[in-house]
Amino acid sequence: MGDQVSRDETQLLIGGRWVDAGDGTYDVVNPATEEVVGQAPNASVADAEAAAAAARAAFPAWAATPAEHRLALLKEAAAAIRAKNDELVPLVIAETGATASVGSRMQVPISADRFDRYSRDIRHVQESMLPPVATTATPLAPGGLVSALAYRQPVGVVAAIASYNFPLTNMAGKVAPALAMGNTVVIKPAPQDPLAVVELARVLDQVGFPPGVVNLVNSVGPEPASVLTASPDVDMVSFTGSTVVGQRIAAAGAPTMKRLLMELGGKGAAVVFEDADLKAAITAIGSTFAFHSGQICTAPTRAVVHRSIFDQVVDGLSAFAGHLTVGDPTEASTIVGPVISGAQRQRILDYIESGRTEGEVVAGGGRPEHLPTGFYVEPTLITGSNTMTAAREEIFGPVVVAIPFDDEEEGVAIANDSEFGLYDYVFSGDTARAFRVAKLLRAGHVGINTAQRNMDAPFGGFKMSGIGRDGGDYGLEAYSELQSIIWSS
């Protein structure tokens, strides 16, 4: 195991001041070693209320700040994050259990990239002229040529509540577009791994965001976050996490008509046709095992495979899983690290046991014997039907369920037979068919013959997978209210 990283954080950022957390601190645990990484600040309900009030007080001046000044601060933030790369990467690896590859390439650099992305000119999103309309006189007003401008105002105060799998990247994807559009924010990291996000708040404070524009609240319990989701001082909640928690946030925000951006659960289906490039399909589906131990909502966790090639794909996935190195995330050779906690590991193992009962576990299926310490789960492949519990519910671990189908109609039906609809995939040598099938899938995002992302594409889910879209310019739109300004000439 690499050198033990240690970091103690005891304070919150509220109204431009770093203050001791009202409920002290708590331990953050390294998922690979089960040792304490450091202390994290534990906010009280009063802290959350004060942060929301500070953001509300700072909003008018920040919204009125010229966009070019706001965007310049985002540019400075990107540079400051990159300058701290060597400090942040080991910290993120220690608190998340991310492998060296994921931590160094996907956690910290992409966070800086997102601040860079939203430091661009926003006028093309903020203002849009409509064609003038010739109107006749009415009892309401004289006739004339009526023009209109669609103008995007900031929403107001945004509570940004991030997930534990990519804490820094996910938070940057919320905070950067929100600030660019003139909103103020209250940052609420996931309790399991908040330390790098605390450092992000410090960076934003140091580069010169005015007091109250960026606030940080962190807690091990849900009460401070619940305050934010119900507070009249908060106009919008941006949340990434489970569907169950998303439902609670929606209910809590309903009395104050909170605007919502929620990226929730996923149960991605990869529909593999008989003419698919099997190596490409297996590699993409195998990313569920290999990429951050399957702790990613976009993962192709259901392999929906044409029966004529089903055995080939199952054999290929079994071999793929068996060749992955599971172990110390600080080692360059490690592909599969731990999951976030002991509780999550047990939850995954319980799903695997249900798969053993309802289907067949053909690869993996337990804890790696050579790793008695750490929250590790073997890359696991289960075969069976789409009615299995493991095929219905989000597992969020290195587990794939393979399901056969006989014709296109059945394959599409199986893929769509889910309460989730975040990210699906189609693999076929006939790209025209793949394109047509993609449009039949009830998912917010569909990859054709690839698991690669386009970060400027609108991202979000159908059904129980969320509300709203972010990514690229759609992220700017998400953190705005659309206003119509009309005049006559």
Image (spheres, rainbow, N blue to C red):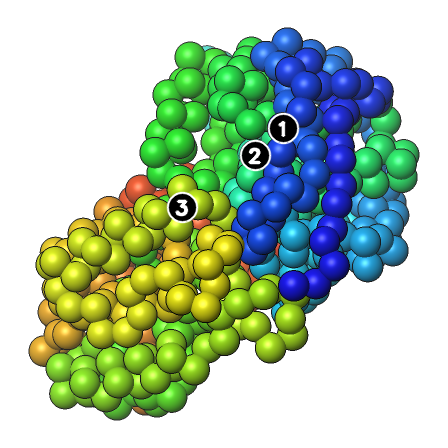
- Amino acid tagged 1: Tyr
Q: Nearer the viewer, residue 295 or 156?
A: 295
Residue under numbered circle 3: 344
Q: Specify whether residue 150 is in view.
A: no
Look at the image and tell me in which quarter the N terminus lies: bottom right
Q: Nearer the viewer, residue 24 or 489?
A: 24
Kindly indicate the quadrant of the structure image that contains residue 25.
top right
Look at the image and tell me in which quarter the C terminus lies: top right
Q: How many circles with numbers are drawn on the protein? A: 3
Q: Looking at the image, is mark 1 or mark 2 nearer the viewer?
A: 1
| Residue 312 disc label | none
Instruction: Report whether 320 appears left or right of 207.
Output: left
Residue under numbered circle 2: 191
First along the sequence among labels 1 and 3:
1
Residue 109: x %, y % from top left: 73, 60
- Amino acid tagged 3: Gln
First along the sequence among labels 2 and 3:
2
Q: Residue at image x 24%, y 80%?
A: 314
| Residue 26 disc label | 1
Q: Residue at image x 53%, y 72%?
A: 335
